[in-house]
Image (cartoon, rainbow, N blue to C red):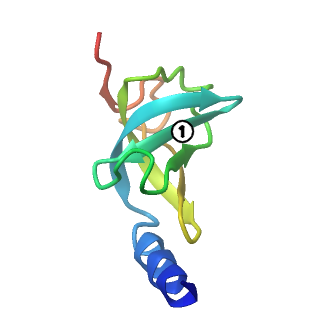
Amino acid sequence: MERQGEISAARLEAKVGSVQRCLIDALDGELAIARSMADAPEIDGVVQIQDGRDAGLQVGEFVDVRIMGSDEHDLYGEVEYAEAGDAAPLGLRLV
């Protein structure tokens, strides 16, 4: 399992700096808990969006996230905005 953890950490680290389209699964305090298109619910890790509450994200919404960090299982990021200073996150809200 130790080797698998190393492989997982390396694969996730390769995503740091990229923008991933994510689906919001839950809100937890200031965080939005999401998954990318590559993640299966309750099987793979999650994407923790650090500014999820401030961005006004809602469960069921898709949003583009700039990946800022990773660990063995999860990715950590912030909402990607269209342009610097833009108040609206990239992505689409399903109604």
x 38%, y 23%: residue: 60
Q: Nearer the viewer, residue 12 or 25?
A: 25
Screen quadrant of the C terminus: top left
Residue 33 coordinates in the image, percent (x, y): 54, 38
Q: Is residue 5 depicted above or below 44 in this figure?
A: below
Residue extending farthest to the right is: 29
Q: Is residue 3 depicted above or below 76 in this figure?
A: below
Residue 7 coordinates in the image, percent (x, y): 45, 84
Q: Which residue is mark 1?
A: 33
Q: Name the amino acid type tagged 1.
A: Ile
> Seen in the image, is 42 located left or right of residue 2?
left
The quadrant in which residue 91 appears is top left
Q: Nearer the viewer, residue 35 or 20?
A: 35
Residue 34 coordinates in the image, percent (x, y): 46, 40
Screen quadrant of the N terminus: bottom right
Q: Secondary structure at mark 1?
A: strand
Residue 32 coordinates in the image, percent (x, y): 56, 34
x 59%, y 28%: residue: 27
x 53%, y 65%: residue: 73
> Seen in the image, is 2 located left or right of residue 21?
right
Residue extending farthest to the top is: 95
